[in-house]
Amino acid sequence: MAKRLSVIQLRQLDERLEKVRDLAALESPPDGWVRTLRQALGMTTEQLAARMKVTRQAVLQLEAAERNRTSTWTSLRKAADAIDCEVVYAIVPRGSLNQVLLRQGRKQAERHLARISQSMKLDAHLVGPAEQERQVDELAAHLAAERSRALWAAESEAGAKPAPPPRYHGHARKVVR
């Protein structure tokens, strides 16, 4: 079984990510960071090429690749070193990690409850919209807290044979834990 982060470790990781969340909103300059910083420092393409020990054409290709978001990590680090800079890298969740888990839990819960709802309709057991929403919220919270691999199952996987979330019984479909 893959090692999962504990609740405390998850919170600590979220706190670390909070420090770089503003960087995720930082947009690259239209010409890319390498060219923009090179020009801000008053460095010519030839001078950067010499410092990187590559051709002028290689620098132009790197700057174009950065604008097109196809540059490599290695080339960016080499250029950054040549202009006395650092490459900063982070993958930042859209919201807290718990929010990501809850959103995914909600998708799975809606998918699961839609299948149950269909069979309930066939048996003439209808659940109102408010109760259905409450059930989705409750199941989503359970799935997010559980953090099992089933949380991230693709729709095709989930449709084939889903990992069973908590069982529901009766007309109210109460969660059995």
Image (cartoon, rainbow, N blue to C red):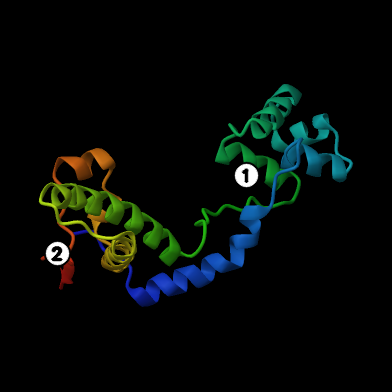
Tell me: 175 left or right of 51: left
The answer to which of 159 and 117 lies nearer the viewer is 117
Q: Quadrant of the N terminus?
A: bottom left
Q: Is residue 162 visible?
A: no
- Residue type, numbered disc 1: Arg
Label 1 belongs to which residue? 77
Q: Position of residue 138 (x, y in %)?
A: 29, 68
Q: Which quadrant: the C terminus?
A: bottom left
x and y, in percent, of residue 160 in the image: 16, 40
In the depicted structure, whether residue 139 falls above or below residue 55 = below
Amino acid on which the number 2 mark rests in the picture: His
2 w.r.t. 11: above or below: above
Residue at (23, 54) in percent of width and height: 113
Q: Nearer the viewer, residue 32 or 152?
A: 152
Mark 2 is surrounded, within 10 Å at the Cα level, by few (under 14), some (14 to 19) or many (20 or more) other residues, namely: few
Mark 2 lies on residue: 171
Q: Residue at x 10, y 66 (%)?
A: 170
Residue 53 screen position, x and y as percent: 70, 33
**Alpha-carbon neighbours of circle 1 within 10 Å: few (<14), some, or many (≥20)?**
some
State whether residue 166 is above or below residue 36.
Answer: below
| CA distance for labels 1 and 2 | 61 Å
Secondary structure under the numbered disc 1 in the rendered image: helix
First in sequence: mark 1 vs mark 2: 1
Q: Would residue 137 be found to the left or right of residue 52 on screen?
A: left
Give me the residue at 40% from left, 57% from top.
103
At mark 2, the secondary structure is loop
- Name the residue at the bottom extreme: 8
Mark 1 vs mark 2, foreground winner is 2
